[in-house]
Image (tube, rainbow, N blue to C red):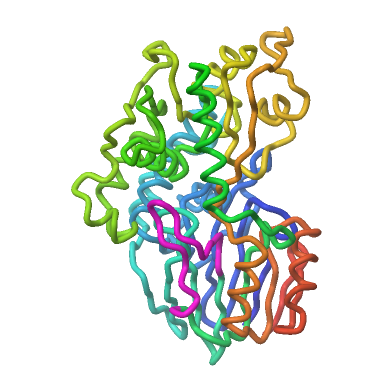
Amino acid sequence: MKIHCLGGIREVGGSCIGIETEYEKVALDYGINVGEASDQFPKDFDAVIISHAHLDHSGNLLSLSRGNPVIVGSNITRDVTIDLLLDMIKIQNLNGNHYPYGNQDVDNIKKSWLTRESIALPGMSIQLYPAGHVAGARMTSINSEGKEILYTGDFCLHDTEILEGGKPESLPITPDVLIVESTYGGKVRPQRSELIDQLIQLILSTIERKGNVLIPTFAFHRSQEMAKRIDQAMENGLLPHYAVYTISNLAHKITGYFTKYKQFFTKEIQQQKQPFNYRHVKQLHRTSQIQEPAIVICTSGFGHAGASRHLLTKWAADEDNSVVINSGYLPPDSPLKIAKEKGELVENGSKISVKAEVEQIELSGHADQLELVQLIRKLKPKKTLLVHGELEQAQALSEKISEMTEVYIPERNETICI
Ligand SMILES: [Zn+2]
């Protein structure tokens, strides 16, 4: 059996691992790297397993839309991926780029998608397991030629307000090869409860000075999780009543899938009749509908465009306001990174000095070093490949686990035979 390390190798983004046996070629994820050509991976796969609906794991699927591989992933992964691909096409067209794919190609992807938790191919069986991280995320185990490979995709082991973490005890023990993400291989995060306290305190102090709180988030999962968290905090009296809004048509559409597929969430969420119809959080379509002061959860997640860009520009110069960054990673050119590190924004060529309180509170959906070590200690893989992480993160993790497993950090396009 051969493992082709095609993408998401020594970096975060554009994930793709090829598994080749005598009879089958299977891809584990088929992601895109922002700014790179979208046709970078081989196309001759019999099946493609999509771990979850983030575009760095699924965004390259359009380049397979004119072939006929089977695509496998959970139904919420399918529906959200379809919406994100349509949105990607829309943005490419708006930007005047000549994009070679259209809505018909997205339809083809949808038609080739099997929403199953297990599948048998000639000489190969494939099984999916919940991975935490985001709704519908799955780990994949592949059994073939007497060997077992487990691919984690992005995962976490801790529970959140709406999602249970992955369960190491339900996974196959002693796989021959574990292919594991290493995004935070060198980082130990503070306890989640500490981070949530920090968020509540920041919102409380902003409410006391009657300021606005801007929370830029991603449309998928982080937006719904943040809305639920704030809604619950108001319901429980941790926060006083205050105007709270979500603004993002894409996020609102995805919230519809969350209601439709309640089975992907915690037991508590499943018991609620309409868990994502919030009591204190209102959906708006435009920033002009906001009645200030307010807490606003909106896209885009890095402040590049949309409501978050508009509100950042509008609110940044006022010291009564605050901005919550909940992503761990920020692209170097993103307005949020520049606002945080340089205390300025550039809008239409003129500089705005940022006086609002800007705080990064990293409520991540990835395993940190402790959880990564916990998983590897439990599974006892014979060999472990570290992917989906910058080299220094992978190296830091490698040092921690080298006595438990034979660990290796592959290079891009390297093929490993087992
Ligand atoms: Zn992800």
Which residue is depicted at the point 80% across and 73% down?
399
Q: Which image quarter: residue 250?
A: top left
Image position of 16 with respect to 1: above or below: above
Q: Nearer the viewer, residue 403 or 213?
A: 213
Residue 154: percent from left, percent from top: 56, 60
Taking the image as drawn, is residue 312 in sight? yes
Quarter of the image that includes the N terminus: bottom right
Query: Is residue 315 magenta-colored?
Result: no
Quadrant of the image occupied by residue 190? bottom right
In front here: 378 or 183?
378
Q: In the figure, 285 relative to 411: above or below? A: above
Q: Quadrant for the C terminus, please.
A: bottom right
Dominant secondary structure of the magenta stretch? loop
Q: Position of residue 307 (x, y in %)?
A: 49, 21
Q: In this view, does 283 lie to the left or right of 352?
A: left
Q: Which of 412 and 341 is in front in this view?
A: 341
Q: Position of residue 353 (x, y in %)?
A: 72, 13
Which quadrant of the structure image shows residue 6? Answer: bottom right
In the current view of this chain or complex, which residue is farthest to the left? 273
Q: What residue is drawn where x is 55% and y is 32%?
A: 202
Q: Is residue 361 above or below residue 19?
A: above
> Can residue 164 be found in the magenta stretch?
yes
Residue 6 visible in the snapshot? no
Q: What stretch is highlighted in magenta?
A: 152-170
* Residue at 56% from the left image edge and 23% from the top image edge: 305
Q: Residue at x 40, y 45 (%)?
A: 82
Name the one closer to the observer, 332 or 292.
292
